[in-house]
Amino acid sequence: MPEPAAAAVRPSGRNTAVGPSARTDVPGKDEPSACEEEHVSPNPVTLSTAELVQRARGLAESGERRLLGITGAPGTGKSTLARAVVDALGPELSALVPMDGFHLANATLIAWGRRNRKGAWDTFDADGFVHLLRRLRDQAEEYVHAPDFDRDMEESIGSARPVHRDVPLVVTEGNYLLYGEGAWSQVSELLDEAWYLELDATTRHERLVRRHEQHGKTHAEAEAWTSGSDEANAALVAATCDRADLRVMVTP
Ligand SMILES: Nc1ncnc2c1ncn2[C@@H]1O[C@H](COP(=O)(O)OP(=O)(O)O)[C@@H](O)[C@H]1O
Ligand SMILES: [Mg+2]
């Protein structure tokens, strides 16, 4: 399947009817992406993890179910920040629902000839993710059981993360939350707030190589995956940065 052009990203309809707590539209969404070229925008704010936890706490204490999305290129620290937020707020206030739980199974990717591009935008069950976000917004069920992703097995695990109806803040994180192709275009309107993480290319590359090595790749394999598949995904994600409510560089 050919890679889509980044230009195919279209503005999302965040102001469609999903209830009072849904996001309104973001200024400048029709302008060219400011951080598409360098993967870093000219004017991100710099905030500490503690400051971002406080911002998330504001959402959690709003009195209504809120969905916070954390996005950014591979290796920018989305999963690390999301875990830090949920750990700091605790299970009464927050729950984590990773987009990575919607990775298609390896058997499916092999059958479809896409195993070597696992992590690309079309190697996820984006429709399933959107349905799950809708269920989380609707709060009709006592529990929504979200899937997780096991990096060692490189497989999703169904229903691994029960989210109780009364937990006010759901934090979701992943590459394609603001992407415009296919079902991904419906995610943005389901979020109350979207943060786009930025990190210089060198540090991001180093962290990705290390992470691949930690999960079993040789150094050469880790370098090849980081420069190839991860970089192709990063270019698509970078083109979505100006749809975020907050573009942020995170300090420890
Ligand atoms: N502040 C940090 N300092 C050093 N390493 C970090 C930091 N944040 C994340 N990492 C590491 O960088 C790698 C990528 O972070 P991760 O949260 O997995 O990124 P993402 O989810 O955006 O792909 C991981 O191995 C993680 O442990
Ligand atoms: Mg991650």
Image (spheres, rainbow, N blue to C red):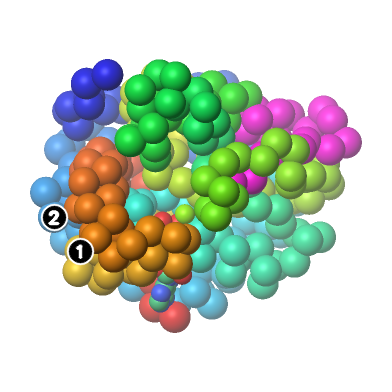
* Disc sitting over residue 38 in the figure: 2
Tell me which residue sits at (82%, 28%) in the image: 140
Tell me where residue 202 sits by quadrant: bottom left
| Viewport quadrant of the N terminus | top left
Which residues, given as a range, are shown in magenta?
132-149
- Under mark 1, the amino acid is Ala
Residue 194 horizontal side relative to residue 231, left or right? right
Residue 98 horizontal side relative to residue 240, left or right? right
N-terminal label among 2 and 1: 2
**Residue situated in front as seen by the camera: 35 or 193:** 35
* Disc sitting over residue 201 in the figure: 1
Helix, strand or loop for disc 2: loop
Tell me which residue sits at (39%, 37%) in the image: 118
Placement of 24 over or under 201, stated as above or below = above
Placement of 77 over or under 62, stated as above or below = below
Is 220 one of the magenta-colored residues? no
**Residue situated in front as seen by the camera: 134 or 113:** 113
Looking at the picture, how far across and down is residue 248, in whole percent? 35, 63
Can residue 25 be seen? no
Helix, strand or loop for disc 1: helix
